[in-house]
Image: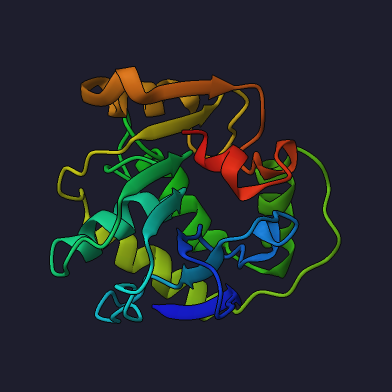
Amino acid sequence: MQVEWLQHSSTSDEVIVVFGGWALGPSPFTHLHGPQDVLFVEDYRDLSTTLPDLGGYARTTLIAYSFGVASYAHWQASNHDPFDAKIAVNGTLTPVNRKTGIPPVAMEKTIETLSPQAYQLFLARCFGAKQDPAEINVEARKAELMAIGERGDAPMVAFDRIWISSADKIMPAANQLRGWQAQSDRITQIDAPHVPLARWSTWQEVIGL
């Protein structure tokens, strides 16, 4: 995993840790503002990385997005859970599953056909509109997808809020709803694409608690 601070002060008593999605980096989140320190995690080829010590914060919150949901749950299985609240956004604990995740056929096609051009189409599907050209390390991101697939279903983790986008073209909303049946009382559905973050301007709105 790769870990970087998006916001880090010496005065905040709250921290948000974001387990981001595949191949998007932190940019979907960088417009969000608030007093919290923000730590961003990505690249799930290897989950052996430890997080910085968060013990000095009065409140710690997890925001797990897309493949970051299952990746966090796998990570937590081998690490102390430091979080007071957990938020899931457009992801499930069964990341590659015909009924409760991304269909295996779609996953296989993404791996087989990944290229700079295919990545631009992926971004358009994520955001619901064509995006500015962006670079991708094709081999690294293929390896990450294969690692996520091989890791398989994640252990059960309870989330405090679960956001599901009704217009998600990456992880179908119907699959997410089935995947979260055991925690259906935590679900809030929103009219948004797979990357729904443009609807919010503050971190607290994403947390929603």
Report the quarter where the N terminus lies. bottom left
Residue 140 locus on image (x, y percent): 49, 79
Above or below residue 82? Residue 52 is below
Residue positioned 30% across, 38% down in the render: 159
Side of 75 where 114 appears, left or right: right
Side of 17 where 35 appears, left or right: right
Residue positioned 45% across, 80% down in the render: 2
User: Which colour style is shown?
Assistant: rainbow
Above or below residue 33? Residue 85 is above
Please tell me in which quadrant of the rendered image residue 43 appears. Answer: bottom left
Residue positioned 61% across, 67% down in the render: 25
Closer to the camera in the image, 90 or 3:
3
Residue 206 locus on image (x, y percent): 57, 41
Q: How many marks?
A: 0
Please tell me in which quadrant of the rendered image residue 75 appears. Answer: bottom left
Residue positioned 70% across, 56% down in the render: 33
Side of 151 where 58 appears, left or right: right
Residue 55 locus on image (x, y percent): 29, 73
Residue 185 locus on image (x, y percent): 32, 18
